[in-house]
Amino acid sequence: MEIEATFVCAYCLQVNSIVIDSSGGRGQQYIEDCQVCCRPNKLTVTIDEKLTDAEVHAEIA
């Protein structure tokens, strides 16, 4: 199942839209480039128990 979410770039503070694949587990970490400034963000993703919503935190990679 795919979940749409957003994160704020740790560098330029712009909002980025992403799609998260919940089959990767309820807790995920990966690198995603900002769609505006192209810098890498380390994303920490937490998916709720119903697999319908996700919380995303970005930090400098």
Image (spheres, rainbow, N blue to C red):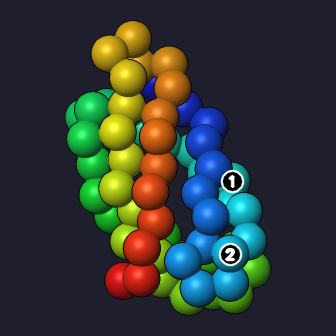
Residue 2 visible: no
Measured as percent of width and height from the top left, residue 59 is found at 42, 73
Identify the image quadrant of residue 57: bottom left
Q: Amino acid at mark 1?
A: Ser
Counting the numbered discs, the total is 2
User: Is 7 displayed left or right of 47 in the figure?
Assistant: right
Q: Is residue 20 visible?
A: yes
Instruction: Say which element carries label 2.
Output: loop
In which quadrant will I find the C terminus?
A: bottom left
Q: Residue at x 68, y 53 (%)?
A: 17
Count residues near mark 1 (Cα–Cα under 10 Å), then give few for <14, some for 14-19, many for 20+.
few
Residue 49 lies in quadrant: top left
Q: Residue at x 40, y 62 (%)?
A: 43
How crowded pointer 2 is (Cα within 10 Å; few <14, some 14-19, many 20+) is rated as: few
Comparing labels 1 and 2, the label whose residue is closer to the camera: 2
Q: Nearer the viewer, residue 27 or 2?
A: 27
Amino acid carrying label 2: it is Leu
Task: Provide residue 10's location: percent of width, then percent of height.
Answer: 54, 77
Above/below status of 34 relative to 51: below
Disc 1, SS: strand
Residue at coordinates 68% horizontally, 75% vertically from top-left?
Answer: 13
Residue 27 place in picture, x, y as percent:
25, 41
The circle on residue 26 is none
Compared with 41, 53 (above or below) is above
Residue 54: x, y in percent?
47, 34
Residue that carries the numbered disc 2 in the rendered image: 13
Against 36, residue 16 (above or below) is above
Residue at image mark 1: 17
| Mark 1 vs mark 2, CA separation in Å | 13 Å
Mark 1 and mark 2 in contact? Answer it, CB < 8 Å: no
